[in-house]
């Protein structure tokens, strides 16, 4: 019996439908699943122009989609070829993925182009892989956490990546070559290697061209850059940039041998670090607009508060000044950066030529920097709660605990102008702007004696070179309300040393905390303390006596007697206490006869405000002597 025409038409339709479903194949299934996954990954809806199966591979062609959010990036991909591990979903199972003809663009003109990407042993979601490309700098910064953590791969190879991006408010082009990510595990990269980078200003823009050699990054976690929740996380275990060559903004060339990084950790915030850095790069640092300056300061403060940097080191810097004079810095290192605090930074092996002078510095180290107050002020400035015309609060000034400078040498041609062996400053916890303790030490200072200087210092035995050292030790003692100068010493080789020990009392802690506003009150309440001034002979007095005797045409013994007579007359004129006058004259005479040391001690007879001393000294410095108990000792 023959079937009716209607039955035949129905059978044909069912056969066609089943055949079409069967003919759709893995490529169509993969395409549908990948596009369906995008909205759940915070990526806008996408389209695939064509899906086809070619020799066991699924090929998706003419793919378009866009990220969502404040700065969306539209993506176009010519073809995506997936080999192996293809199922009915977008899940990849040890698949080989090849992407060709990638373009990403944003509304502000920033874009990227990639000719080809090869991904080996891919696992996870193809939709996540595609979604991760919806960012301005794919493989370096993610679109969002869901996309970068949605897949893994044994390796990702990108022969070339070209970016058009904004830096410091200006457009530049950056070309990356031979990019290879190894052991990519859901956002974390075992190793990232970049064969080279070239950045240059785009047409019509000013800027510098920079070339960077082979760079390596170990333990890079791209998810930390787009994460806004959770605790602190390690963003990078270590890294290095290869040799850097370029020109500065003034057109002068420079090279850097290498830059290395230690561990870098991040803290989450209201916006991701990628969004934060993008916002910073859009700002022109030279702008004088008040709102722009406030925004820039706020972004910088937020970035510094959220980054912990174990170490950054730059080696082998060679450059030039604007006058085309050479500048060299063998090493710069920054360590222990965390929420406004810096453990240390150091410059080493510096050489600068300027104004017909050559300056070399062996090392400058700054340790224990606390700029948390400055970050807080920057935040207040950004929020409009502080203006440039207001006085800066003491808490905003960075607190620095130690500075060391070594081997400083200044020359003019072959002539040395000055040399410093070592200069060191240490400070204690601050009281307002005043360190509770300050220690400074200078050693190995040398300076030549030239021209008119030679005639001035020849009487004390100096002819060619001055060599000196100095030391300061100050401390505020809270319980005694005193600032104590435990040691202020200047020592000149072949001349002698002068040491001052003194104290200033009546200094309330609250007054120190209020400086500089409390300076007037502090000046009125400050009181003189005990003071001792000691000179220790090292040839200067003997040379002066010998020179002066020769100039006077008398023997040294006769000249010494003349000095002693003059001292006795002078002391008697200003010291009414005869016994005290005789003891002072006797001590000075002993020192003149055999110069070794001379110590003068002044002890206040009561509370003596420094303001009263200043008034008394207007007529004559000797007018204040009756206010003190005086003692002079020689050669002890």
Image: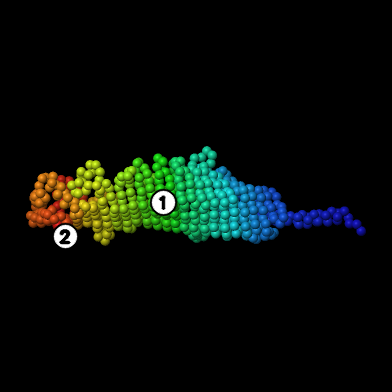
Residue 424, image quadrant: bottom left
Instruction: For residue 489, say whether it is visible.
Output: yes
Query: Which of the 4 image quarters holds residue 452?
Result: top left
The residue identified by callout 2 is 636
Q: Position of residue 300 (x, y in %)?
A: 45, 50
Taking the spot 57% from the left edge, 48% from the top edge, the residue there is 161
Residue 336 spot, x, y in % from top left: 42, 57
For marks 2 and 1, give the CA distance. Answer: 49 Å
Residue under the point 28% across and 59% down: 478
Q: Nearer the viewer, residue 162 or 418?
A: 418
In the figure, is residue 95 to the left or right of 409?
right
- In the drawing, what numbered circle is on residue 330? 1
Q: Give the image location of residue 221, x and y in percent.
A: 53, 57
Task: Using the image as rendered, state which of residue 527 and residue 127 is in the foreground.
Answer: 127
Colour basis: rainbow
Residue for point 7% across, 55% down: 578
Q: Quadrant of the N terminus?
A: bottom right
**Going from the N terminus, do you reach mark 2 or mark 1 first?**
1
Name the secondary structure under disc 1: strand
Q: Residues within 10 Å of mark 2 (few under 14, many from 20)?
A: few
């Amino acid at each position: 019996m023959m079937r009716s025409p209607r039955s035949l038409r129905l059978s044909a339709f069912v056969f066609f439908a089943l055949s079409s479903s069967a003919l759709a194949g893995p490529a169509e299934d993969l395409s549908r699943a990948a596009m369906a996954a995008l909205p759940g990954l915070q990526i806008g809806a996408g389209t695939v122009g064509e899906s086809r199966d070619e020799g066991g591979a699924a090929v998706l062609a003419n793919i378009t989609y866009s990220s969502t959010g404040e700065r969306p990036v539209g993506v176009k991909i010519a073809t995506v070829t997936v080999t192996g591990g293809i199922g009915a979903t977008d899940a990849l199972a040890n698949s080989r993925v090849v992407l060709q003809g990638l373009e990403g663009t944003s509304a502000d003109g920033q874009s990227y182009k990639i000719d080809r990407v090869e991904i080996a042993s891919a696992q996870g979601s193809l939709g996540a892989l595609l979604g991760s490309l919806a960012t301005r700098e794919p493989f370096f910064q993610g679109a969002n956490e869901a996309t970068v953590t949605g897949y893994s791969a044994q390796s990702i190879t990108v022969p070339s990546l070209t970016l058009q991006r904004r830096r410091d408010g200006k457009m530049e082009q950056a070309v990356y070559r031979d990019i290879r990510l190894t052991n990519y595990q859901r956002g974390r990269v075992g190793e990232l290697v970049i064969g080279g980078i070239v950045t240059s200003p785009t047409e019509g823009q000013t800027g510098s061209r920079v070339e960077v050699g082979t760079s390596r990054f170990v333990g890079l976690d791209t998810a930390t850059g787009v994460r806004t929740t959770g605790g602190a996380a390690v963003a990078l275990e270590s890294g290095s940039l290869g040799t850097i060559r370029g020109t500065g903004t003034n057109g002068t060339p420079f090279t850097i041998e290498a830059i290395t990084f230690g561990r870098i950790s991040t803290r989450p915030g209201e916006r991701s670090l990628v969004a934060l850095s993008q916002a910073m790069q859009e700002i022109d640092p030279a702008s004088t607009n008040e709102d722009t300056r406030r925004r820039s300061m706020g972004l910088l403060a937020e970035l510094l508060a959220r980054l912990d940097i174990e170490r950054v080191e730059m080696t082998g810097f060679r450059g030039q000044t604007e006058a085309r004079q050479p500048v060299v810095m063998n090493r710069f290192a920054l360590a222990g950066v965390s929420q406004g605090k810096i453990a240390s930074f150091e410059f080493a092996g510096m050489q600068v030529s300027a104004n017909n002078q050559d300056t070399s510095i062996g090392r400058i180290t700054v340790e224990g920097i606390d700029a948390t107050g400055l970050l807080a002020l920057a935040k207040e400035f950004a929020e409009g709660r502080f203006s440039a015309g207001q006085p800066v609060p003491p808490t905003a000034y960075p607190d620095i605990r130690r500075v060391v400078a070594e081997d400083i040498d200044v020359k003019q041609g072959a002539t040395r102008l000055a040399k410093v062996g070592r200069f060191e400053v240490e400070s204690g916890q601050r009281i307002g702007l005043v360190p509770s303790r300050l220690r400074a030490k200078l050693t190995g200072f040398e300076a030549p004696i030239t021209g008119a200087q030679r005639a001035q210092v020849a009487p004390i035995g100096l002819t060619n070179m001055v060599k000196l050292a100095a030391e300061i030790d100050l401390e505020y003692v809270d319980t005694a309300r005193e600032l104590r100068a435990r040691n202020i010493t200047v020592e000149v080789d072949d001349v002698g040393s002068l040491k001052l020990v003194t104290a200033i009392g009546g200094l309330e802690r609250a007054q120190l905390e209020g400086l500089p506003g409390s300076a007037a009150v502090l000046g009125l309440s400050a009181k003189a303390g005990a003071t001792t001034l000691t000179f220790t002979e090292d040839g200067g007095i003997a040379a002066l006596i010998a020179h002066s005797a020769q100039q006077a045409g008398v023997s040294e013994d006769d000249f010494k007697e003349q000095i002693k007579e003059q001292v006795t007359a002078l002391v008697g004129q200003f010291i009414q206490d005869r016994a005290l006058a005789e003891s002072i004259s006797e001590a000075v005479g002993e020192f003149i006869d055999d110069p070794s040391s001379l110590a003068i001690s002044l002890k206040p007879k009561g509370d003596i405000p420094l303001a009263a001393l200043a008034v008394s000294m207007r007529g004559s410095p000797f007018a204040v002597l009756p206010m003190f108990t005086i003692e002079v000792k020689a050669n002890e």
